[in-house]
Image: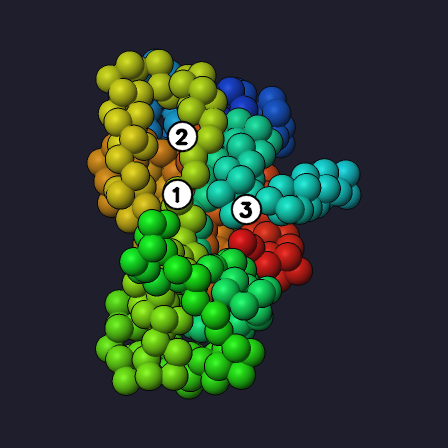
Amino acid sequence: MEQLSQRERDVLQSLIQIHIATAAPVSSRAICKKYLSELSPATVRNTMMDLEERGFLDQPHTSAGREPTDKGYRYYVDSLMKKEALSSEEKRLLRRRFRSYFKDRDAEYAFNEISRTIAQLSHQLGVVLSPRFEEGILQKLELIPLNRSRVLVIITVTSGLVKTITVEIDRPSRSSTGRRKVLISRKKLREACQLFNERLAGLSIKEIRRSIQQRLRYSTQTTPELFSFFIKQANSIFRFDSPRDLFVEGRTNIMLQPEFRDRQRLAELMEFLDEQDRVISLLNQQAGKQGVVVTIGSENAFSQMQVCSLVTSSYNIGDLSGTVGMIGPTRMRYSKYVSLLEYTAKLMSELLSETPLT
């Protein structure tokens, strides 16, 4: 990283902190008045000119003050920023809310509410990308008889996900009802369960759904109706993915930001957010990275996002991971939001390990 003198560092940090708060170009006099009273405005102005020449600052108008560039923000985030720790009350609030989201709720509800909470606390866009559940590895499958034809299926994935589903095994009948219940003994059920685990345990959910017919092809002689049922219903029985992968809340927050008074710029961003595949692609680029990742302006691959910053962190459910984050203009309160997402990801990982998703 390019080296700056202590004075340059002090001026850049002071300017960015004022600009984040005011959304306006910053003058040398404002920096002296608020932060660097020991320096003269002329000295600060000369330092600002040097920083502009090196690409850290920009002067939008000849007579105006300066604003940070993407390069200036990057230096600030990497070398100057001091994280603002969340207060004990803020942490208690998040823990209380998140516990209520996961209690007796499905994944879609929890992730949607978390994205909404991030948007409320940050006044930016809150985003959550669900884990790629289909990449989870089957740990074991259990078959518990409820009566002679109804079976409780319990599927446990190494990530900590658990799915339970009640199935009734039947087959076509010549009677007027069209179906006939199949009676399966406990012994046959145990044998079938053992074969299921021998053939399927250790495979990803995605692989099971793709190849179950081939893997169970020579097992149907034990309880043909049961195996035939599992083959035909594999897409629903072994379905862990949420109906939605991406959760975005807080669009009004973006619309109120001064940077988006330009309606064309706002329209382009809203159009981008409507295209889920591109947003998911953007978030997947950050997936699995350690800690909080800050992607600033032109560092984003998509042109519509180059007036924005993306702040993300990964959360874990066993061996699976998802992404939680926020999107806002490059002029954002990084020092606070990094701490917020760091704690949010940690809390999600903790609660998800305690409460298996359904």
Q: Label 2 to label 1, Cα distance in Å?
A: 26 Å
Quarter of the figure with residue 269: top left
Residue 122 visible in this rendered orientation of the protein: no
In the rendering, at what x and y percent does residue 21 appear?
A: 54, 24
Q: Earlier in the sequence, mark 2 or mark 1?
A: 1
In the rendering, at what x and y percent does residue 189 appear?
A: 50, 78
Please name whichever residue, 25 or 259, is drawn nearer the observer in this view of the structure: 259
Query: Image height check: is 151 above or below 280?
Result: below
Q: Which residue is mark 3?
A: 106
The residue at 48%/73% (across/down) is 184
Q: Which residue is mark 1?
A: 244
Q: Which mark is residue 329?
A: 2
Q: Earlier in the sequence, mark 3 or mark 2?
A: 3
Q: The disc labelled 3 sits on which kind of residue?
A: Asp
Q: Colour scheme used in the picture?
A: rainbow
Q: Label 3 to label 1, Cα distance in Å?
A: 12 Å
In the rendering, at what x and y percent does residue 51 appear?
A: 37, 38
Please name whichever residue, 100 or 155, is drawn nearer the observer in this view of the structure: 155
Query: Image height check: is 238 above or below 44?
Result: below
